[in-house]
Image (cartoon, rainbow, N blue to C red):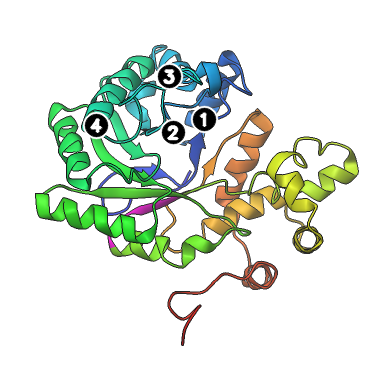
Amino acid sequence: MKYTQLGRTGLKVSRLVLGTMNFGPQTNESESHALMDAALDAGVNFFDTANVYGWGENKGRTEEILGTWFAQGGDRRDKVVLATKVYGNMAADGEAWPNHDKLSALNIRRAVDASLKRLQTDHIDLYQFHHVDRSTPVEEIWQAIDVLIQQGKILYAGSSNFAGYKIAQANEVAKQRGSYGLVSEQCIYNLMERGAEMEVIPAAREYGLGVIPWSPLHGGLLGGALRKEREGGGARSTSGRSGEALADPKVRAQIQAYEDLLEKHGLEPGEAGLAWLLTRPGVTGPISGPRTREQLDSALRAVELELSDEVLTALDGIFPGPGPSPENFAW
């Protein structure tokens, strides 16, 4: 496994992040435990989750699965850099109650204690804001975070789905308070969705945040969706967002060109999609959310994969980036 620093921190994390969103909804507890053991054995030390994972009536279930895994001992918790998130309402669907969501000091205090209990640990290494809260002053958010850091309940704070200017605003306010500020940004970023290159990633690099891409294969589209469709195993890869995207002839043509290119070079689409992200400036490591051991093994191979200049140039031709701002919309 390869490691890097998380943004400007001294924290060393693996260049592959184990995403746990499928643990519970798609992968049962024992299988989830086996995947975490395999990931740790392979050197993956960065695990990402969120308090709402489990979804619907089972919000919090994913954190509980991590908690029972940590409880098995064997230095599991000590070896893992644990990241979770706060923002969503944890009440059962249709039973939302005031102050049980977003980033008020009250909800942050409530949410972190609940996550710690589910995770069966005394601290969270990276506590991430799952979404921008437009109704809570940034000063209040940092006040709450500083208290948690002083209490030893969290070590670092990160953001997710923040615009570039929100990253700047958060860290400027942190600087004024003498707080450490955000150390990471988790954003959607992949070959098909490169909008983060305009302002989010430049802001993250300017302020010393590590970039953690989610949906690195764009919901399966970049994982060989058309090949699986032809082979009759693409029911999942061509459903939902992926299926809607493939209904667009232009998108379908892009994916076909992508798969043809990688076949020519003897590369697996899913592995190449992850490996491309590892070449991008500012990226700490993409989040891989495996449901099976086969998917985990594929993601692990991506870390060792080095794409040639020829392949990288061809990928830019198929999926051109937006270019920096303001040049992409002005002179």
- For the magenta stretch, what is the residue range? 207-212
Describe the element under mark 1 as helix, strand or loop: loop
Type of amino acid at the residue the image marks with label 1: Thr
N-terminal label among 3 and 4: 3
38 above or below 198? above
Mark in front: 1 vs 3: 3
- Considering depth in this image, is 264 or 238 the residue closer to the camera? 238
User: Marks 1 and 4, how far apart in space?
Assistant: 19 Å
N-terminal label among 1 and 2: 1
N-terminal label among 4 and 2: 2
Tags 1 and 2 touching, CB below 8 Å: yes
Type of amino acid at the residue the image marks with label 4: Ile
User: Marks 3 and 2, how far apart in space?
Assistant: 25 Å
- The quarter holding residue 86 reads top left
User: Marks 3 and 4, how far apart in space?
Assistant: 23 Å
Residue position for label 4: 154
On residue 20, the disc is 1
The residue that appears at 34% across and 22% down in the rendered structure is 115
Describe the element under mark 4 as helix, strand or loop: strand
Q: Position of residue 170 (x, y in %)?
A: 25, 52
User: Marks 4 and 2, how far apart in space?
Assistant: 15 Å
Residue 294 in sight: yes
Q: Position of residue 180 (x, y in %)?
A: 18, 48
Residue position for label 2: 47
Question: How many numbered dots are placed on residues in this image?
Answer: 4
On residue 91, the disc is 3
Mark in front: 3 vs 4: 3
Q: Is residue 298 left or right of residue 92?
A: right
Q: Position of residue 128 (x, y in %)?
A: 34, 39
Categorize mark 2 by other alpha carbons within 10 Å: few (<14), some (14-19), many (20+): many
Type of amino acid at the residue the image marks with label 3: Ala
Mark in front: 1 vs 2: 1
